[in-house]
Image (tube, rainbow, N blue to C red):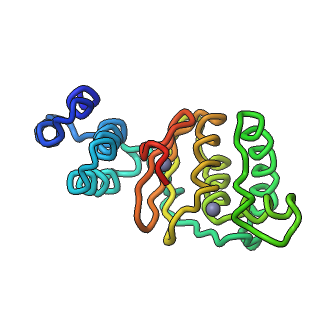
Amino acid sequence: MVDLLGGAGQLDCTWNFIQDMPIKPGISVLGAMLGACKIHKNVELGEKAADKLFELDPNEGGLVELRKEVHTFYSRSTNHPQSKRIYAFLETLGDETKAAGYVPHTNSIHDVEEDVKEQLLGSHSERLAIAFELLNTSPGMTLHIRKNLRVCVDCHDATKYISLVTGREIIVRDLRRFPHFKNGNCSCGYYW
Ligand SMILES: [Zn+2]
Ligand SMILES: [Zn+2]
């Protein structure tokens, strides 16, 4: 229903429908609403949907705040207790995503060798967070990442491929945007 109404550009109508729903809207409904808002460039309703999405009870919505703890990652950091596992897993993910078509945006970095560039990009904080959540959640659970800076174009692309090869939905909230990754696509419609 939300897909249908939102798809036709009837966003106000869809939003009213969501608010009148007898049950609390979950991730899929709000995610669809958010996707429609992006497509039709309705920032106001998009923000409302995004806020609702973040208010969801973690247990109901499948948001992954592990055992009520917030895990924070810094780019290239190795001080998390699971660091070894996380970096090893990122390497596997790197191979799988490249096999699926991901090409690292190494031209954003200069003066170092190609493999070093890939390592630098591949250890951005959101990559570490995604790997950590994949390792610590059950198959099928949606990943939920917050970032206090803008997600770079390479992480954006990598996350699309990670959603494809792992079959997980990944929701990232950064400073400016709120992309929702699923099956190799992103709710922003590739604009980054
Ligand atoms: Zn990045
Ligand atoms: Zn996107």
Front-most of residues 109 and 102: 109
Front-most of residues 60 and 188: 188
Front-most of residues 152 and 2: 152
- Total labels drawn: 0
Residue 167 appears left or right of 17: right
Query: Percent x, y for residue 144?
Result: 49, 53
Q: Residue drawn at (63%, 69%), measured in percent from left and top?
A: 73
Q: Is residue 170 above or below residue 72?
A: above
Q: Residue drawn at (24%, 34%), measured in percent from left and top?
A: 6
Q: Could you say which quadrant of the image residue 113 lies in?
A: bottom right
Q: Could you say which quadrant of the image residue 12 lies in?
A: top left
Tell me, yes or no, if residue 26 can be seen here.
no
Q: Residue drawn at (58%, 66%), measured in percent from left and top?
A: 71
Q: Is residue 151 above or below residue 11?
A: below
Q: Quadrant of the N terminus?
A: top left
Q: Is residue 14 above or below residue 132?
A: above
Residue 167 appears left or right of 50: right
Tell me, yes or no, if residue 100 can be seen here.
yes
